[in-house]
Amino acid sequence: METELIKNNEEIRVLKENIGRLKIQHTQNNEEITVRNGNQTNPNQQTPQQTNNVPQQANNNPSQDSSLYFASKYDKTLTGPLTSSLDANFRVYDVNENEGKFECIGQVGNPNWFERICEIDTTNGIGNTQIITTQAGKVRKEGNNWVVITPAKIKFE
């Protein structure tokens, strides 16, 4: 039974990564179409949007929150832009031109999912599901994508 759960978790992780890769490819295809059409706006293009909702670990003043939220990741790229912190796993904040900080705000059961974007403090174990960002990571905007350049430090409680 436990082996089957591990296999299912791995399959879910692979599916999420595949979806993330497809979203990136979709965004890049839309950018190419926009360029070919003389930079006309493409209504189907998905880009991160600002929101006034407060995430789990954000500041408590929603009127000043200009955070960006993401549901998933593919390799070192944050994917699945969201309009609020609901269902988000990552928050990008303190954006200055093309760079910003990011933190993990969701609850993910598989610590391996954070490979390449987070360093995990395992002193509390890895079986816990509440994620605490102990040190923000850094991201850089490349095209329409936010790419991790410095991993965040997290622990589980």
Image: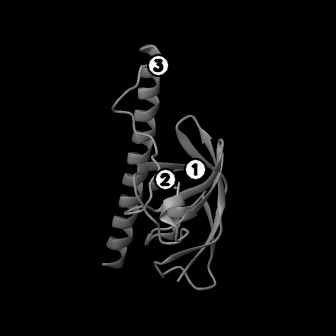
The residue indicated by pointer 1 is 76
30 w.r.t. 91: above or below: above
Badge 3 crowding class, 10 Å Cα cut-off, few under 14, some 14 to 19, many 20 or more, is few
Kind of residue at disc 2: Lys
> Measuring 33% from the left and 65% from the top, which residue is drawn there?
8
Badge 2 crowding class, 10 Å Cα cut-off, few under 14, some 14 to 19, many 20 or more, is many
**Position of 48 compared to 43: left or right?**
right
Rendering coords of residue 90 (x, y %)? 50, 60
Q: Are marks 2 and 1 in contact (CB under 8 Å)?
A: yes
The residue indicated by pointer 2 is 73
> Measuring 47% from the left and 19% from the top, which residue is drawn there?
39
Q: Are marks 3 and 2 in contact (CB under 8 Å)?
A: no
Rendering coords of residue 155 (x, y %)? 59, 76
**Position of 12 compared to 114: left or right?**
left
First in sequence: mark 3 or mark 2?
A: 3
1 w.r.t. 152: above or below: below
The residue indicated by pointer 3 is 39
